[in-house]
Image (spheres, rainbow, N blue to C red):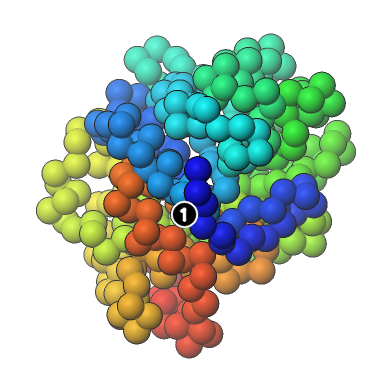
């Protein structure tokens, strides 16, 4: 597979050199589960992954929970036939398992994590997972047990690096007593900025690598999300029920999109690329996870990897907290 060269940055102290944007595989898990994105064509998912790799993206972030295995299966199909040296880094997560009615159940017990890693390895078709992450610190009382299981998996060689997602500083400190936290994956965007106050500075001080998710606010900041489109979202698309996609928050977010559009016009790029580039300005952030569902979305958003926003651009975008 012919690949384009993109600039990379080391992910914390892992030694992994990752492109500034990675392929986010939440949406390609499809619909039919609690946090699904509505119908998704697997052929388009696989084509999107392959196009991203051709353009030089060298990591994919997925999770066992996305479609309860469906996203990992799509990733596995897309990577089939690639040698160990050709394939991108594969990051996935554990701790959310399927419950009644295809709803999420949180489980951080050792036994559950061992079952999950076996399933993920099989679906992804890899010998070892490059980065394995605790998806949510729930239940809080079990995070030490879960993290000890992760540390053991690394020692066994089933996973190469271990990290967490959605943890706060106090929780990070607790599990650091068991084993070093190599990476953190928080939600971060112009809509969700709170982690910049304490969590991102902590990660930077501790040498914890950071990859952020939902830099475009789950589609809100792409410039393509209108009131009419939200009304037309599939009934099994989780965003239709999310408060950020409803009033009074929606009007604030669409005003923010107006500012993104103004900056994007100056750089001849898209509002979504500007939104992603804004997250990459934070010195603690090594990479941003960009959700892609179709191959035609790749080129447009890849510009974020090289877009250097000025302080004036950032001030304009940050004009009011949303």
Total residue callouts: 1
Residue 299 drawn at (x, y percent): 37, 59
Residue 62 point in image, percent of width and height: 51, 35
Picture layout, residue 276 above or below residue 114: below
Residue 168, x across and y down, in percent: 66, 47
Look at 64% across and 60% down and name the residue there. 8
Q: Residues within 10 Å of mark 1 (few under 14, many from 20)?
A: some
Q: Quadrant of residue 7?
A: bottom right
x and y, in percent, of residue 14 in the image: 77, 47
For label 1, the residue is 55
Q: Residue at x 40, y 12 (%)?
A: 100
Query: Which residue in the rendered view is the most extreme toward the bottom?
Result: 312
Q: Residue furthest front?
A: 2
The answer to whether residue 91 is left or right of residue 223 is: right
Task: Check the image and name the residue furthest to the right.
Answer: 177
Residue 143 visible in this rendered orientation of the protein? yes
Residue 11 appears left or right of 126: right
Residue 118 vs residue 79, the one in the foreground: 79
Q: Nearer the viewer, residue 196 or 287?
A: 287
Q: Residue at x 50, y 49 (%)?
A: 2
């Amino acid at each position: 597979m012919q690949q384009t060269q993109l600039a990379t940055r080391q992910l914390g102290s892992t030694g992994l050199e990752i492109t500034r944007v990675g392929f986010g595989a939440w949406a390609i898990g499809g619909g039919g589960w609690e946090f699904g994105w509505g119908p998704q064509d697997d052929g388009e998912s696989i084509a999107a992954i392959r196009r991203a790799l051709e353009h030089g993206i060298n990591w994919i972030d997925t999770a066992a929970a996305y479609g309860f295995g469906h996203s990992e299966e799509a990733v596995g199909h897309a990577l089939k036939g690639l040698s160990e040296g050709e394939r991108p880094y594969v990051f996935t997560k554990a701790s959310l398992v399927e419950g009644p009615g295809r709803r999420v159940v949180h489980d951080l017990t050792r036994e559950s994590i061992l079952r999950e890693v076996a399933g993920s390895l099989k679906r992804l078709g890899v010998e070892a997972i490059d980065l394995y992450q605790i998806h949510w610190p729930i239940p809080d009382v079990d995070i030490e047990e879960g993290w000890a299981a992760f540390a053991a998996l690394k020692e066994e060689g089933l996973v190469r690096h271990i990290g967490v997602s959605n943890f706060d500083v106090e929780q990070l400190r607790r599990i650091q007593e068991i084993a070093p936290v190599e990476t953190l994956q928080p939600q971060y965007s112009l809509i969700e900025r709170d982690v910049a106050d304490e969590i991102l500075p902590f990660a930077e001080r501790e040498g914890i690598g950071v990859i952020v998710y939902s830099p475009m606010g789950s589609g809100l900041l792409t410039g393509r999300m209108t009131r009419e489109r939200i009304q037309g979202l599939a009934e099994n698309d989780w965003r239709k029920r999310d408060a950020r996609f409803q009033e009074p928050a929606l009007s604030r977010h669409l005003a923010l999109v107006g500012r993104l559009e103004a900056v994007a016009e100056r750089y001849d790029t898209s509002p979504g690329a500007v939104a992603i580039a804004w997250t990459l300005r934070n010195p603690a952030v090594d990479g941003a996870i960009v959700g892609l569902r179709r191959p035609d979305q790749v080129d447009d958003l890849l510009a974020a990897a090289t877009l250097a926003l000025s302080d004036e651009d950032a001030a304009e975008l940050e004009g009011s907290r949303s």
